[in-house]
Image: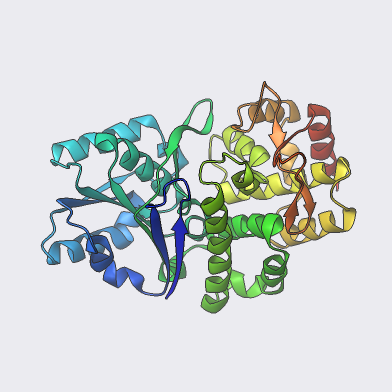
Amino acid sequence: MKKITVRIPENKSLSYPILMGSNLIKNIATYATKNSNHSSIVIITDKTVKKTYGNSILNSLKLIGIKSFLFAFPAGEQSKNAETKQLLEEKMLQAGCDRNTLLIALGGGVVGDLVGFIAATYMRGISYIQIPTTLLAMVDSSVGGKTAINTPYGKNLIGVFWQPKAVIADVTFLKTLPNKHVVNGLVESIKMFLTSDLTSFKYLKKHLDKLMDTNEIILKNVIHRSIHIKSNIVNQDEKEISGQRLVLNFGHTIGHALERLTHYKMLHGFAVAYGLLVEAKISELIGILDHTSYLAIKSILNQLHFFGSALKQFDIHQLIKATQLDKKAKSKQVHYIILKSLGEVYVYNDQFSHPVSDQIVKKAFLEIIEE
């Protein structure tokens, strides 16, 4: 088992462990009750994960005499909304959950974001643990305390920063993960390595075939490298005050817009993959990223079967309109993370995001389609 500790400088007393390894879930009762006296524990998951893991974890908690509950909601990004949040909160109130209740977010990014937001607002804030069951959630969304729900106006527009008590990343969950969800998570690791770690990008590229075969050793290394990068950034810029945490949004301005245009039917990692293509092309067009580096990004995404031609189905004007709701937008001007080179983002005047004209975005989009 490997352990990384997240420490929040603004709150010196706030730190929590990220545990990563195999078969950690067998000791969930120990992790959940360590150094705490919880009145009850509530596992919240989606209906798909509930069938596979939910009941067994619930039983393990009940065996040690803890009053425990299991609530589930329909799987998918469409459930990450205010209505689902309210329904789950009402179930907790009916069950008599109080300020000493511990929440467990068991599932992928949707579960983690939603449960984290409930934890932040239920009785003005209670503790929660992240148990990510997807590669995407392990390498990205479970780490850093970002919680949110979606609205008809855009993704993750309503939320709060609320750090978990612990993150337990058990790679055993990944053995049953469909291939498309492996790819879904790898894209986020690619994003992190492109912005922060050239060595890790080369490592992932070298072992891509083994990763697609879910080789456990290689997966553990990629997960650990990804968590290490993200935790370091969170340690330095929990709430995007300095702007450094914005680098994690590379590919996401276009990616979130694509998700919105498809009514969240496109997987997050898939949308980000196309976002990486477009935003890398933007970086090249404005003269920051060299062509060879752009081709390296295009190559690895092509290997994962992401091609610019797939974007032909989208209207560029609708896409640009959708980007205007991005959280990085300032005075109706959309800002992007610009890649300087493989493993490094462009920073100017201590700013990590930069305004890009609609004309450049349109040109990048059209060039991607024709390549």
Tell me: residue 323, above or below residue 186.
Answer: above
Viewer-side residue, 26 vs 262: 26
Identify the residue at the far top of this view: 331
- At x 26%, y 61%, the residue is 32
Q: Is residue 300 left or right of residue 19?
A: right
- At x 70%, y 65%, the residue is 201
Image quadrant where residue 271 sits: top right
Coordinates of residue 213 in the picture (x, y in percent): 58, 73
Coordinates of residue 322 in the picture (x, y in percent): 64, 28
Tell me: residue 207, above or below residue 138.
Answer: below
Colour style of the rendered protein structure = rainbow
Q: Is residue 350 left or right of residue 237?
A: right
Identify the residue at the far left of this view: 65
Image quadrant where residue 369 sits: top right
Q: Is residue 194 visible?
A: yes
- At x 88%, y 58%, the residue is 292
Q: How many marks?
A: 0
Coordinates of residue 245 in the picture (x, y in percent): 59, 46
For the N terminus, the quadrant is bottom left
Q: Is residue 273 left or right of residue 312?
A: left
Tell me: residue 191, above or below residue 358.
Answer: below
Viewer-side residue, 13 vs 184: 13
Identify the residue at the far front of this view: 12
Q: Is residue 154 left or right of residue 357?
A: left
Coordinates of residue 179 in the picture (x, y in percent): 55, 63
- At x 48%, y 50%, the residue is 9
Viewer-side residue, 203 vs 236: 236
Viewer-side residue, 28 vs 5: 5
Q: Is residue 182 visible?
A: no
